[in-house]
Image (spheres, grey):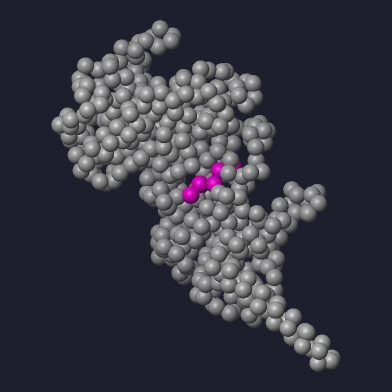
Amino acid sequence: MSAVKAEKTRRLTEKQQNYWQAEIDVCRADILHWFDRWVWTYDPRLIGDRDGAYVPLKLWPKQREIVVWMLAQIQAGQEGLVEKSRDVGATYLCAGVALHQWLFKPGFKATFGSRKVDYVDRRDNPDSIFAKIRLMLRRLPRAMLPDGFNYVRHDTFMRLVNPANGALICGEGGEDMGRGGRSSVYFLDEAAFVPHVEAVERALSGNSDCVIWVSSVNGMGNLFARKRHSILKQHQIARLHWRDDPRKSESWAQAKQASFADPAAWASEYDIDYAASLEGACIPAAWVESAKQLMRLEPKLMSAKAVVGLDVGAGKAKSVAVTRHGPLVAPPVSRSEPDTTDTALWALDIARQADARCLAFDAPGVGAGVTSALMKQDVSSRLIIAPINTGTGPSSRRWPDGRLSSDMFGNLKAEIWWLCRTALQRTHEHVTFLRSGKGRAHAPADLLALPSGDAESDALCLQLSLVKWERNDKGRIVIEGKPALRQRGIASPDHADALMLTFVEPDSYGMLEVL
């Protein structure tokens, strides 16, 4: 080789080395860049497409949020939960996050667990978790692999070793999960379906501070649901719904739903409906989903004079305020401070900013302090302050079928929940009509558009479909109380109760004062 050619080769090699070093540095610092440039996925349903079944994993906006959220949980060393629809790539996201940290974080260790070992690693199962990790690994450029890495020595059954930095990805399955050493993060796959999961949780408590529970839903009778609704805080919870997938449309959903013999299976596996098989749910989750879509589909919705509902929190419970402008519900707001005077002034400020005609709140118990504080305020605008006891009798309302509320409901709480239920039922019928011509059209003023996309709004929408109704010994409708909810592992539905208070008609109650 001539000296000139050798110099050209040297410069080319140096240029390539510099490129890869710069690219690796960017990937180390930016996990989203790494996903976008170097991560692949596999879908055998695409075998007939031009590009085949192996395709780059192009993250959707929601998937990007989930990746960043997972990394934040790992860095903070705290527990997290991902509730998901089927076929939204959640396992690929977990595998990708683990592989990224394996590449770039010395001493990192991720463990994947599932109810069966075969779901974690089985060479002839392309759907196993380690098969997904290997797919990503083998599609990486050689320059990005660890120094000294050898597939035969370092990629073995349920174990992937990084010889350059000591990082490790391993797997477990069955009832002994969590007992295999310590981990930087533990991903528990399909956690809602793991048998004897309480024993697994006890083992996991000593394995890692960061356990990520990932699952489609399986009703309310399991630890995954209790963690979602009663144990973890909102910032520890992530949601990946089929509507987040830009590949899926309403027509796809209708066709897919029609393929299920059991409607509850669709609701549970795709619509993330914990109450799919719940008998006596006051507000079906399908109605809530329609209300979340209403703003996009119905251009004739008109705002009206606002009403603010306030659910007053006691002790560590939050106080939640919901503002409703006719059919339009604004995102809830909440505060954790227990001082009732401060809560009263906070709610009053919300009502003033919304130019509300009424501020309705639950008056019994801790609400008495709010009542006292509000009655001392000098309110210059005309605002109805409405301390409500939902345990009292229903109003004198006459319903379209001619019945009185006093004949239908055991108390005011049941009446206002039923008013909200009726509005959401009409909304579901109206949205169905707009989408398919089926259902039934209603006046926009009789509908209810729910907010979504932020933690407070998602909490409201979720709580609405978890509460049951039944009939008392007199045959009147009553709503499930907080003690019964706690027995089912559900925390107080404070966001939903705040919305219900916006359905109170204060002019019907002589106990109110107008300031």
Query: Which image quarter: residue 495?
Result: top left
- The reply to whether residue 307 is in sight is yes
* Left or right side of 174 for 318: left
* Left or right side of 317 for 93: right
Instruction: Find residue 377 and report its horizontal and vertical position in percent.
Output: 18, 32
Residue at figure coordinates x 54%, y 73% from the top left: 167
**Image quarter (top left, top right, bottom left or bottom right) of the C terminus:** top left
For this orientation, the residue located farthest to the front is: 380
Residue at figure coordinates x 72%, y 56% from the top left: 55
Query: Does 452 appear in magenta?
Result: no
**Image quarter (top left, top right, bottom left or bottom right) of the N terminus:** bottom right
Q: Main secondary structure of the magenta part?
A: strand
Instruction: Find residue 464 and report its horizontal and vertical position in percent.
Output: 42, 33
Residue at figure coordinates x 82%, y 87% from the top left: 5
- The reply to whether residue 286 is in sight is no
Span highlighted in magenta in the image: 238-242
User: Which one is nearer the viewer's eye here, 96 or 342?
Assistant: 342
* Left or right side of 160 for 507: left
Q: How many numbered discs sit on the rendered protein?
A: 0
For this orientation, the residue located farthest to the top is: 402
